[in-house]
Image (spheres, helix red, strand yellow):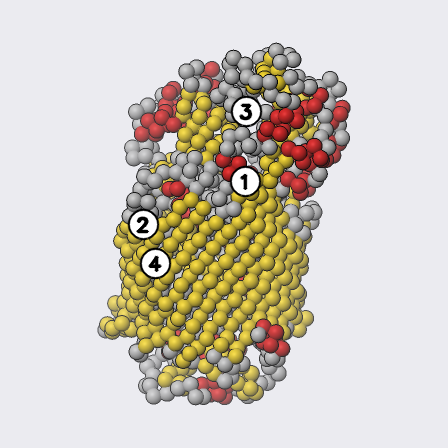
Amino acid sequence: MACSAALSAQAQAAPGRIDLPAGELATALNTLAKQSGTQLVYRADQMKGRRTTGVQGAANTDQALERLLKGSGFEAKRDASGAVLIVQADATPRRAPAPRPAPQEAPPGGGAAQAEEPVTQLETLQVTGSRIPRAQIEGPAPITVVTAEQIQAAGLTSVPEVLRSLSQNSGSVQGQQNTTSAQSTPGAQAVDLRGLGPNHTLVLINGRRIADFPLPLNGRSNFTDIGNIPLGMIDRIEVLTGSASAVYGSDAMAGVINFILKKSTDGTIIDYRYGDTERGGGESHKLTLTTGFERDAFSGIVGVELLDKRPLWGYERSNQDSTLDAPTSRRRLPRLTAQRYDWDDDVLIGPDDDCAAMGGLNEGTTVLAENRWGEPYCGSERAIAYRTIQNERKGVTAYGSFEYRFSDSLSWFADVQAGRQEVRLLTGTNGNDVVSDVMGWEFHDPNSTDNNDKVFYNALTGHYEVWSRQFTPEEIGGLRNRMNVTTQKTFAVTTGLQGAFGEAWNWEAAYNHSQYKADVGMPRIRAQAANELFLGERQGYDADGYAIYSPDPTRLFTPLTPAEFASIAAMSTFRPKADNDNLSFTLDTPALFTLPAGDVGFAAAIEYGQQSYEINPDPLALTADAYYGPRYGDGEGDRDRWSVAAEFRMPLLSTLEASLAGRYDRYNYGNKNPGKFTYSAGLEWRPLDTLLVRGSYGTGFRAPDMHYLFAGDDYYRTLSTDYYQCRTDEPTFSDDDCYDDGTWDINTFDVYTGNMDLDVETSKSFSAGFVWSPFANFDLAVDYYRIRVSNQVQAQSREQLRVDEANCRLGTTDSGAAVDINSPTCVDALARVIRDADGNITSVRFAPINIANEETSGIDVTANYRLQTANAGDFRFTGTYTWADKHTRQQYPGDPEEDMLDVSFSATTLPRQKGNLGVSWDRNAWGASLFGNYLGRVANYANDAWTKATWRFNAGARYDINDHLRVSLTVNNLLDDMPPKDATWANYPYYDTSWFDSTGRSYFLQVTWKLGGEAL
């Protein structure tokens, strides 16, 4: 069918005539309005199911309109305002309403933008933010609409890039470079509206829920992966910020992001893009094919996207290719390759040959190094950079949207999406003295003495020792052999019936299923095999419980052959899966009844859903002795949800309209049945045709994430700083001094566990603002927002628990502020930080908890201007800006509020400002654009000073060889800016990966060829 559609596609109309293909009447009317510049006013609900035989060779707009409407039961009438009304043939038309501010589309960044054409098409649209079709996009709450054309003009090449450009997306999201994120959720990427956490943003595709990524973010919360959504198949993205729980469900506290995929095309589009970076690495190829078909009552669109993106490595960027790039002297030391530590004498012992045998490893950079105390070990400055900055990603995604019309009032529909992508990445460690569990080994025996399982008794020396080894590219047979390999398999289908009855009632019954499966291959080292390779056979245990060996130290400092390495290497495979199933029935009408000021719109919905996940880990990864490094936890669970919702839109006066929505959600999991009613209300006031004043208020309710509830024990063998001992021994030290010094680091065995006793989260959201269009081609939108989340669930920070424990024991913070040992925070921290009889920390037991609240407020501003000239072409200017006035959180009632916008905040500080500016130019076959992203200052690593604000610019140009063939060039990071310097960011890659990367300037060359249909 796709090939037939391509062969039979319409050729472009010749000059001086109007040609329109057969198909949906509403689509044909929209096309005619854009081509002719004629303002058409009609009710889209009356157009549902209406078809047209098309137009061939019409001489003018009136003739084309007459032929389009022939036999449809509609006719065109022009009223005194100059608008053309499409009405039923036997109907007496009312005067067309005076044009209001045109339906707006927003550039990346948010807010409203000037419509693409200088006409007002008052089509009844269904948009994110309401289930009721209505005659304009702008409503009581601000909505951002980003079209495919705007994405192209801004030079954004992936869905995560598009969402990262939104000024409302202000959360600190861990990306591809973050070691913890890459290990726990390899290949997945998240979005975080208003900085309230990725799990508080509801992500939809075509208005439908999709399955979560099957592994929890950082081993904690569930979230939606936006990294595998095909950019080339997106028609537009709609973003509603603020609580939308009353309309879309209990999990839409921070907002909703709705990806609308293409629904129709009048030809076949072949789109190929080649990308590369100026500094090398990260080459990419993307091919998208989209085509449509129509066979009598059956129509559809099919698309396929192929992606081949190669990795970008840390050693390919000069600002992070060596430990010498570190800002602190301790971190500039070579990263260890082999190290022998005498625990009794507290000293390192170097090899007899001063590391000469290992000199060829790490590309010939391995040398005899000394730590900050002058003790010897074998190390390399370069080995720190053997990791990926950008993942390798290869895959295919297919999408289809189909419709069969039984009659004008009944049709069947189906949307199907399937994808398979393979993501490869390699993680490393942040310090020069820490061994990676991916490419390293350090003796550990879970049967040895508690808290010292990395220590063994050397029978040849009579001392207790710790041996550590990091493996090199030469030993492992190339870096690709140690890459994490994740195969992502996604499938989603939505099918159902929709129709109309009576004069103005519409209904839809739908079933939606989505599934996300993954095969996650994590390279590991088999602990027992590595122990034997380096230490020989174990000779039992001594009286104190330590394993006894008689090892040859030359084995530690001798390079391995690839075969020897293969004998201790393994691939630990997890097979997680997540499912989401929903049944829904919706009903709506634009005229439930009539008030003096007009018709009251109404919509209602009833839904039932099932959600489940299971991690399906490698059984050996759950044991304490199978692999070197951390044990991993398990988790699985399911729950049911049902809900009922209703929404009204009521014209109170000719200039005042109100909206009201209510919803009840109820969950069922374990022995819990939490449920709650939520509501929202909004007002729209138009005192002038050019001014909209609006406001909205809503409540929210959210059940805890699945993994917060159902997580099994997850184990972390880690090096932890004992802040209490440090600040006792060194009263003048700050917490940062303690962490950076390393003297008070101790091995701990920390445990994370789910919490079935978690309470539900609730929220309140408010927004108020205006949209002003004082003259043609200009608009300004200003909106204030405030969101407060109560009982918010967050996983506790192990680092913060140890800091809190020290503060509580000492009665003061490191800055001198008094701390009450009887406060809720102190009671909790003292119970969770476990010490042995000698006062040493052995474990931190942490879990998800309900914190008291988190609150954020601020202002969004958007301005757009279009300048049309007779000779120089058309110019469009856009600007968006978000200023966060407040973002605070409180862990327990009675605790002081923490300011998340201030450098004093102990966790990641959020930026107060984000924004962007864009300008585009079009003249005949040529076009160009410049788009800049602005990120306000963010805190440095030490949280005691600011990192400067930054701009990143993209530029683009296009040339239409003819009206069906286009070539375009995009340059991202036009000025080749690198991350700002931070003298306190000692951990690799020495900058904040939440906001910055070292990709540098990159180029994308794109060729778009359309076979048949209208011009591009």
Of the pair 340 and 154, the residue shown nearer to us: 340
Q: Give the residue drawn at x 50%, y 85%.
A: 53
The disc, 2 or 3, on the residue closer to the chain's N-terminal end is: 3
The quadrant of the picture occupied by the C terminus is bottom right
Q: Which residue is mark 2?
A: 668
Seen from the viewer's position, the closer of residues 774 and 334 is 334
| Mark number displayed over residue 1000 | none
Q: Which mark is residue 608?
A: 4
Q: Is residue 408 above or below residue 709?
A: below
Q: Secondary structure at mark 1?
A: helix
Q: Looking at the image, do the residues carrying marks 1 and 2 touch, with CB atoms under 8 Å apart? A: no
Q: Residue at 64% x, 12% y: name it.
A: 461
Task: Characterize the local packing of mark 4: few (<14), some (14-19) or many (20 or more) Cα atoms within 10 angstroms.
Answer: some
Residue 454, image x and y in percent?
Answer: 55, 23
The numbered mark, 2 or 4, whose residue comes first in the sequence reads: 4
Q: Are marks 2 and 4 in contact (CB under 8 Å)?
A: no
Query: Given this view, does label 1 or label 2 mark the residue nearer the observer?
Result: 2
Q: As drawn, is 594 to the left or to the right of 455?
A: left
Residue 445: image tag: 3
Q: In this rendering, does residue 28 appear at all?
A: no
